[in-house]
Amino acid sequence: MSSESDTLDKRLADIYKGKESEPNLLNFPKVEIVYQSGTKYDSGKPRLELLPPSYWKSVNSQHSYAMSMWHYYEATFPCEIGFDAVPILEFGAEKYDSYNWFKGMSWGRLVGAFHRHCNYLEEACGMWAPRDLSAFDEESTLAHGSHAECCRIFLQEYYATYKEGKIIGEADCPWCDNVKF
């Protein structure tokens, strides 16, 4: 008879198929483990993660400003945006694969996606401006706020495991150098 924790270990270990080591996910070893095999289709999209916090403040994008402040200065992690992330997880499971995000990817790509879902480009002036988060994304037909919330959740999980001495994806954001294990 298998215990509930053994079942959880097996389910989560399946996420790591093809990796050299499959850690006991209920008791991670205190070593650095790097995973980066998650898929994200953002080729040709603007790299908004490179814009500094002052830009987002100047265009009054409160969510992007909060994300940037955390991104650069390790301030309190941005709070929930107030949209349901579950429909996005279901959309992602169909588009990519279940738990694709947990396989890891560049953290900066998630920050960029967060900014793109919270803002839109005003063609007339060429500036990014806050978007109505209840507006629908063309591809998924789901709310941009739900997409942004999903990005926030993924980054929060990546960062939490990073602080524990593990890495999911490529920790390519400025605050990573200052984290002490």
Image (spheres, rainbow, N blue to C red):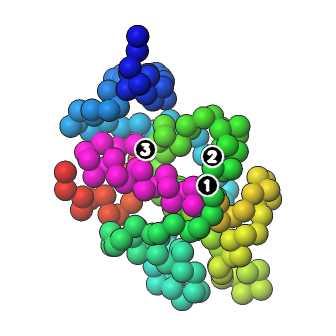
Name the secondary structure under disc 1: loop
In the rendered structure, find residue 42 and report the number of the disc placed on it. Answer: none
Residue to which mark 1 is pinned: 85
Q: Position of residue 119 (x, y in %)?
A: 65, 73
Asked if marks 2 and 3 touch (Cβ < 8 Å), the reply is no
Disc 2 designates what residue?
89
Residue drawn 57% across the image and 61% down it: 149
Q: Which residue has dot 3 on it?
A: 169
Answer whether labels 1 and 2 touch (C-beta < 8 Å): yes
The answer to whether 151 appears left or right of 9 in the picture is: right
Residue 63 in the magenta stretch? The answer is no
The magenta-colored residue range is: 148-169
Q: Quadrant of residue 75?
A: bottom left
Residue 91 location (% of width, % of height): 70, 45
Quote the CA–CA distance across marks 2 and 3: 18 Å
Q: For the point 76% across and 80% down, which residue is it?
A: 123
Q: Nearer the viewer, mark 2 or mark 3?
A: 2
Q: Is residue 135 visible?
A: yes
Q: Secondary structure at mark 2?
A: helix
Residue located 49% across and 52% down the image? 154
Q: Is residue 80 left or right of residue 129?
A: left
Q: CA distance from mark 1 to mark 2?
A: 6 Å
Crowding near the residue tagged with mark 2, few <14, some 14–19, many ≥20 C-alpha atoms within 10 Å: some
